Image (cartoon, coloured by chain):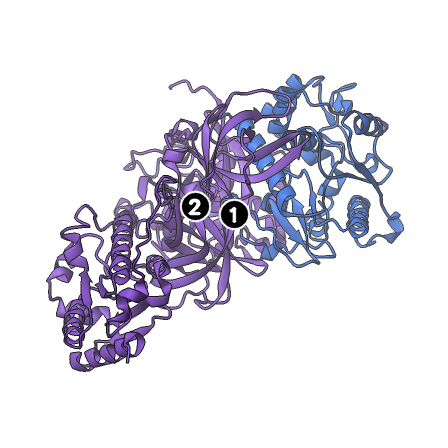
Amino acid sequence: MRKVKFSHETVRVVIVGHVDHGKSTLIGRLIFELDQIQDGRYEELKKVSDKRGMVFEWAFLMDALQTERDQGITIDTTQIFFKTKKRNYVFVDAPGHKEFLRNMITGASSADIAFLIVDAEEGIKEQTKKHGYLLKLLGISKVIVVLNKMDKIKYSEDRFNLVQDDIKGYLNLLNVNAQVIIPISARDGENVNNKSKKMKWYKGLNIVESLDDYRVDDLSSSFAPLRLPVQDVYKLRDKRIIVGKIESGKLKNNDEVFFSPSNAKAKVKTIELWNSKKKSVNTGECVGFTIDQDIFVERGNIVSFGQSAPKLVNTFEASIFWLSDNPLNLEKKYTIKLTTAEYKVNFEKINKVIITNDLSKKGVNDILRNDVAEVTISSQLLVPVDNFYDNPSTSRFSIIEGFEVVGGGIVNTDNYPNQRKLTNKTNENIVPISSKISEVDRTAKQKHRPGIIWFTGLSGSGKSTIAKEVEKRMFSKGFNVFILDGDNLRSGLNKDLDFSPEGRMENIRRTAEVAALFSSAGFLVITSLISPYKSERKKARMIRPEIFKEIYIKASLKVCMQRDIKGLYAKASSGEIKNFTGLSAPYEVPDSPDLILETDNISIEKTIDKLENYIIKEFGVL
Amino acid sequence: MDHLTKLENQSIFILREVFSSVKNIAMLWSLGKDSNVMVWLAFKAFYGKIPFPLVHVDKKKKFKEMYEFRDKYEKEWNLKLIKGMCPPIEDIDPSLPKAARSAARKTEGLKQILNDYKFKAVIAGIRRDEQGTRAKERFFSPRDDEGTWDIKNQPPEFWDQFHTKYPASVHLRIHPLLSWTEIDIWRYIERENIPIVNLYFSKKGQRYRSLGDKDITNPVKSNAKNIKEIINELEKTKVSERSGRLMDHEEEDVFEKLRSKGYM
């Protein structure tokens, strides 16, 4: 046998799975097999089992509460410590009953690796699937599958293969990697810490071997960029010490650090520790440091380096789990806690509620207790955040309503643009001139005031058609009118831009600036772009709010897809076009547009009449 | 990062988190090994000066060595120490078994202090490996004004997101050492050279493994005369840490009863 050197590292293992599939029993038996039941404990548990008229119950080692023992189920998560020849383990028992999902999440969220346990006779059940899905959401993508109660199916290899295929299929859907699938009998200790003689057909690892086989990633050697959420600022004598935990990356003296969301910069002067000195600190350390500038820093700020700062967004998508008795309310404000910061947010939209049974989507529906769902969230304040799969610790949050934690989630920032204003500062050497002809002079001879008619709507909603017709009519009425069309601009001025969130954001910014210039020249400008983001439309409005009118060209996605004039929906559906608004990229419906033009049911003629009247009313000079 | 350093950082994070989010907090100092580790971690978290008071709930039944230790380090460590008294045994629920009844005096003493000082959070050095119901604890654990632990309805706690928003009648018990084990504590005491009461070391073939009050704590058989020997002993032993605590063995659910009423 290979000689194993004992290491003091501790691996955290969570056991999840459907109620009564044997989680607590496996842990009890495992500790017995490793000869680590404390003296007197076995007798004590035997007494407790006898008292309840039961055969010896391993689960009582974990289920310490009276109600747990009386009802024979685990209510709250618990932890137990043991060691193998190789290293220490903490086993986290997570309740399998669906009523106690919050406790399952509490237990599982801190684990390095998970055991997903399945009753070989019963096969996959509801909570097997929900737990599998939640593991992924909690950031655990390595799973050891345990098929328990093999004794009940007479240690049959055929039955094992059948259930094994089922589970593999489901985990594949989730993108969860099942490292091994082990057939065991927890009660009888088969394949727990031995090679079972009753299952000679099984050649793989047993439970203890599979644990020792698992390699823990060393976080401090990762290449993730610096993230240090500020926990507090201590004033000690003449020093101002910024404290927090390094969630990723490294920090050393003289580094130039960058604060989000303020965009302030400073140099690290000293790293502060009690009774010891260090010049650099690494991932996982709770540190303190001083800086060379007197800038405002507070709890919730994120410290990074300038070139690898987190995104700054006020709208983002998230996968969430919901634990409250009240359904998620789209009208209500919630607080989310992300790193050490808190934000007031609205849930803008439910994108899908996921049925964990077959991973199909219930469609847009209510989010009820113990549901998992995908949503769009918006915050008044800018949120510094990463994508969960790039940097989990700075992209997961809890949701708070009143005095209660009602859920949690992970962030996906792919579909919304970075709002950081780094390039928007005007160079101080630029001095804009003002013309000798005022706008009033310029428009005095016209039959109308200048204006910006800003269209927003899905592809195929009718923007271009309406724009062209209205332009024609207004021109014939003597208006100086001009269309800025999205596709036209993208073939010239905006040729360099793609359809990423940032590309769309810049597309809108340039169009808005050009529209403002045209309006200063006295024109009535009609812009015809999808302009999917509320935040960007708001910025466009802010250039000249007094003459800006947001016109929502409203048509359902279904109708737009049927029209598909440019054939784009077909291409997007087949995956040929990525980031397509409405399908693979978000469209944010305006909250209070200046005018809504519905094109689903109302004729184009009437729609154009309506817009024409509106323009004359708002911009016409009698 | 090694195991002890990981634990150390987790505890410091928790201490800083409660200090930053809850006004008016205190730390329980029982004078035992865990408690001293906790004070040490607070020095690290707050740069040598603990910005909140320590509380010693005293049944006047500690060992002489412990009182000496307290008086010495109160000065040396420059601690702001509140010494709390406990009600007499006659005031305690007579239905409790004897040792548990004695221990419950401490719960009442703590309630008195919470009431007098209006602390919104108290930091306590309990660990999950000590006892089955402690294994079910949260790092941030809410209690109502009676100190009651609603064990069947604990809030979720995930991803270092510690919840601190509660109605005014609720106080929090903060448990920065929850993930530590007995042997971790000793290895850390050794590494950091943290002072402890000498009752932990063997005299005449016996030592105290866990220090409670004199009336309800027995020593265990041991020849471990220094920290190294204690660690060696713990690596091999199958005797539970609290085997010398009389109250733990009186009834199956005595600890759950005590804890749900506010015992640490």
Q: Residue at x 37, y 35 (%)?
A: A308
Taking the image as shown, residue A50 lies to the left or right of residue B2, namely right
Camera-nearest residue between B245 and A462: A462
Image spot of residue B238 (x, y percent): 61, 30
The image quadrant where one finds the N terminus of chain A is top left
Circle 2 — which element? strand
Q: Position of residue B244 (x, y in %)?
A: 73, 34
First along the sequence among labels 2 and 1: 1
Residue holding disc 2: A384
User: Which chain is drawn using blue?
Assistant: B
Label 1: how many residues lie within 10 Å, few (<14), some (14-19) or many (20+)?
Answer: some
In the image: residue B59, left or right of residue A611: right
Q: Quadrant of residue B66?
A: top right
- Name the kind of residue labelled 2 in the image: Pro
Please state if A142 lies on the left or on the right of A338 as rendered: left
Q: Colour of chain A?
A: purple
Disc ID at residue A341:
1
Examine the rendering and report whether any part of residue A339 can be seen: yes
Is disc 1 placed on a helix, strand or loop? Answer: strand
Spatial CA distance of label 2 from label 1 is 10 Å
Mark 2 surroundings: few (<14), some (14-19) or many (≥20) residues within 10 A: many
Quadrant showing the C terminus of chain A? bottom left
Q: Are marks 2 and 1 in contact (CB under 8 Å)?
A: yes
- Residue A432: % across, % down: 34, 48
> Mark 1 — on which chain does it sit?
A
What chain does mark 2 sit on? A
